[in-house]
Image (spheres, rainbow, N blue to C red):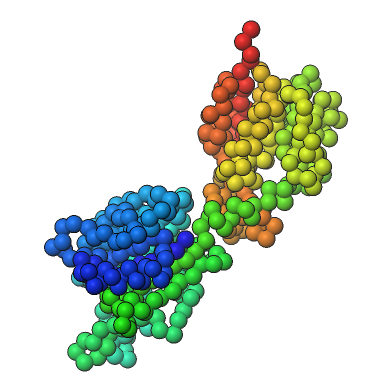
C-alpha cells in the first residue's frame, strides 16, 4: 500500500494547484491521498480530484481513495482528524492547531488515548503537526526555533510510547529533512513538521519506506508550500498470508498432549471411533490406539505421512491446536473439513491455545504481527493466533447441521476448547 500526504495550504480550489497535484499523483500513484488544509474555509463544497474518490473531509483534513481500489471505511474523529480503516490498518490524517502549544498538547492527549483504545488496529498517523519533534527539526536561522516547547515534545513522546509508534523518518533519515521553509524577518525558518508516525511492526517490515518529496514545494512543478510525504508498506494480506507454514509449528511430543488426555478422561468412550484431524506427527493417535480406541489420524502436510483422507465418518473428531496455527481463511476451511468427518449425532472437539497465553508470549518474545495473530518465528513461518471459547463458537456458528456448542474442557488458562454437536438424521 502507498499513502501520499501533503498540506495544500487551502488551495485545492485553484485549477493550477489542482493540476500540479494531479501531476504529482500520476507520478506517485498512491492508494490513499491524505490532505491537510485542502481548501479554504469559505469554500463550502469539497474538491473533486480526477482518479480519486472522496472518503470524507472538511477544510482542515480530507481523504481520497484511488478509484478502483477496494472499499475503505472512513471514520470521522474531529474537525482536524480523519481516519480510514483498510483491513487491520487504521490510517489517520491530522492537522494540528497552529495557535498555541497548549492546543497542540491537548490534541496529542486525545490522539494518544483514543488510539490506545483501538488495540485491534495497526495505526499510521500522517499530517502537519505544526511542531518540530526534536530541536534540530525546527530552525530559525542557524539556531533552534523557540516555536516548539518541551511540553509539546513530551506530549508527542507520550503518544509514541503509549501506542508503540515510531517516527518513520528516524528509520529513513535524509540530508534535507525539512518539509516547510519560509523567510521570516530576514532569516529562514525551517521545520520538519510533516510527520509519519506508524506502528512499530509496520515500521520494521521489509518494504516499508518513507519518501519526503520536496518537489511539491520546489521547482517548476511545485504547487504548495509543504513537502509531500509518501509512505509505502506491505499490508498484512500481501506480505504475510503466503508465508505462514502451519506444519512447522507442530510440536515434537514425547507423550500424549494434555487436551487429548483430558478428553479421554471426561468425554471419550472406547466404543467410539476417533479421528485426530491435523494429527501432526501422530503421537496422540498412537496413544489413543494403545488405550484401545479405533483411531485414525489425518494431516494435509506431506511431511507427517498422514495425507490419505479417511473414507469413513467418526463419532468424535478432534482438532487439537490446529486452528491457532492457521490464517483466517484456512482456519475456517479446516474447521469445515473437520466437520465433514463427523457422523450425524457425533461431536467435533476443537482446542486452541488461549488468547491470554499467546498475547503474553508475543509480548515476552517480541513476536511480529501478522494478520490477526503473530509470527513466533518469521523465517520458518510459525504463526500463532490465540482463540477463546467465544472465538471458537463464532467460527462454527454457520454449520447447517449444528445442534449446539459448549466448552469441552473448562477452567484452562493455557488453552480454550469447544465441543460442537452434530444433529442426528431424522428417524
Q: Can residue 56 be seen here?
A: yes
Residue in view at x 28 percent, y 70 percent: 19
Q: Is residue 216 above or below residue 312?
A: below
303 with respect to 127 (left or right): right
Number of numbered discs visible in the structure rendering:
0
Residue 217 place in picture, x, y as percent = 31, 79
Q: Is residue 130 above or below residue 389?
A: below
Q: Tell me the quarter of the image containing the C terminus.
A: top right
176 with respect to 18 (left or right): right
Residue 245 place in picture, x, y as percent = 68, 51
Q: Can residue 157 be seen here?
A: no
Q: Is residue 76 above or below residue 224?
A: above
Residue in view at x 64 percent, y 37 percent: 334
The quarter holding residue 27 reads bottom left
Residue 325 place in picture, x, y as percent = 64, 46
Residue in view at x 38 percent, y 68 percent: 26
Q: Nearer the viewer, residue 5 or 101?
A: 5
Residue 34 place in picture, x, y as percent = 34, 63
The quarter holding residue 268 reads top right
Q: Is residue 416 above or below residue 380?
A: above
Q: Nearer the viewer, residue 68 or 180?
A: 68
Residue in view at x 82 percent, y 25 percent: 294
Amino acid at each position: 500500500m502507498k499513502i501520499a500526504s501533503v498540506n495544500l495550504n487551502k488551495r485545492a480550489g485553484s485549477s493550477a494547484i489542482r493540476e500540479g497535484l494531479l501531476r504529482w499523483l500520476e507520478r506517485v500513484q498512491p492508494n490513499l491521498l491524505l490532505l491537510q488544509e485542502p481548501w479554504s474555509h469559505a469554500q463550502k463544497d469539497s474538491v473533486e480530484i480526477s482518479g480519486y474518490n472522496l472518503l470524507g473531509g472538511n477544510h482542515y483534513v480530507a481523504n481520497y481513495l484511488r478509484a478502483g481500489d477496494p472499499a475503505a471505511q472512513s471514520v470521522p474523529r474531529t474537525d482536524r482528524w480523519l481516519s480510514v480503516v483498510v483491513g487491520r490498518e487504521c490510517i489517520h490524517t491530522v492537522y494540528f492547531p497552529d495557535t498555541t502549544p497548549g492546543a497542540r498538547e491537548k490534541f496529542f492527549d486525545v490522539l494518544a488515548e483514543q488510539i490506545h483504545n483501538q488495540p485491534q488496529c495497526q495505526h499510521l498517523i500522517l499530517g502537519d503537526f505544526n511542531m518540530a519533534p526534536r530541536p534540530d527539526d525546527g530552525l530559525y536561522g542557524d539556531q533552534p526555533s523557540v516555536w516548539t516547547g518541551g511540553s509539546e515534545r513530551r506530549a508527542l513522546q507520550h503518544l509514541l510510547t503509549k501506542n508503540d509508534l515510531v517516527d518513520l523518518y528516524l528509520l529513513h533519515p535524509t540530508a534535507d529533512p525539512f518539509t516547510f521553509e519560509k523567510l521570516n524577518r530576514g532569516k529562514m525558518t525551517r521545520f520538519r513538521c510533516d510527520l509519519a508516525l506508524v506502528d512499530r511492526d509496520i515500521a520494521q517490515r521489509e518494504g516499508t519506506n518513507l519518501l519526503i518529496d520536496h518537489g511539491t514545494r520546489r521547482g517548476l512543478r511545485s504547487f504548495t508550500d509543504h513537502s509531500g510525504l509518501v509512505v509505502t508498506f506491505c499490508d498484512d494480506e500481501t506480505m504475510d498470508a503466503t508465508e505462514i507454514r502451519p506444519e512447522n509449528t507442530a510440536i515434537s511430543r514425547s507423550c500424549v498432549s494434555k487436551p487429548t488426555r483430558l478428553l479421554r478422561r471426561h468425554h471419550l468412550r472406547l466404543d467410539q471411533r476417533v479421528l485426530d484431524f491435523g494429527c501432526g506427527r501422530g503421537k496422540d493417535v498412537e496413544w489413543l490406539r494403545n488405550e484401545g480406541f479405533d483411531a485414525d489420524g489425518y494431516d494435509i502436510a506431506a511431511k507427517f505421512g498422514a495425507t490419505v483422507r479417511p473414507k469413513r465418518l467418526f463419532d468424535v473428531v478432534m482438532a487439537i491446536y490446529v486452528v491457532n496455527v492457521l490464517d483466517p481463511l484456512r482456519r475456517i476451511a479446516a474447521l469445515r473439513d473437520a466437520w465433514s468427518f463427523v457422523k450425524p449425532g457425533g461431536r467435533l472437539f476443537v482446542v486452541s491455545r488461549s488468547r491470554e497465553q499467546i498475547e503474553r508470549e508475543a509480548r515476552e518474545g517480541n513476536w511480529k504481527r501478522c494478520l490477526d495473530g503473530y509470527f513466533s518465528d518469521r523465517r520458518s513461518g510459525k504463526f500463532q493466533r490465540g482463540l477463546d471459547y467465544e472465538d471458537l463458537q463464532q467460527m462454527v456458528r454457520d454449520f447447517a447441521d449444528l445442534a449446539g456448542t459448549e466448552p469441552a474442557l473448562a477452567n484452562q488458562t493455557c488453552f480454550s476448547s469447544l465441543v460442537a454437536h452434530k444433529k442426528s438424521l431424522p428417524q
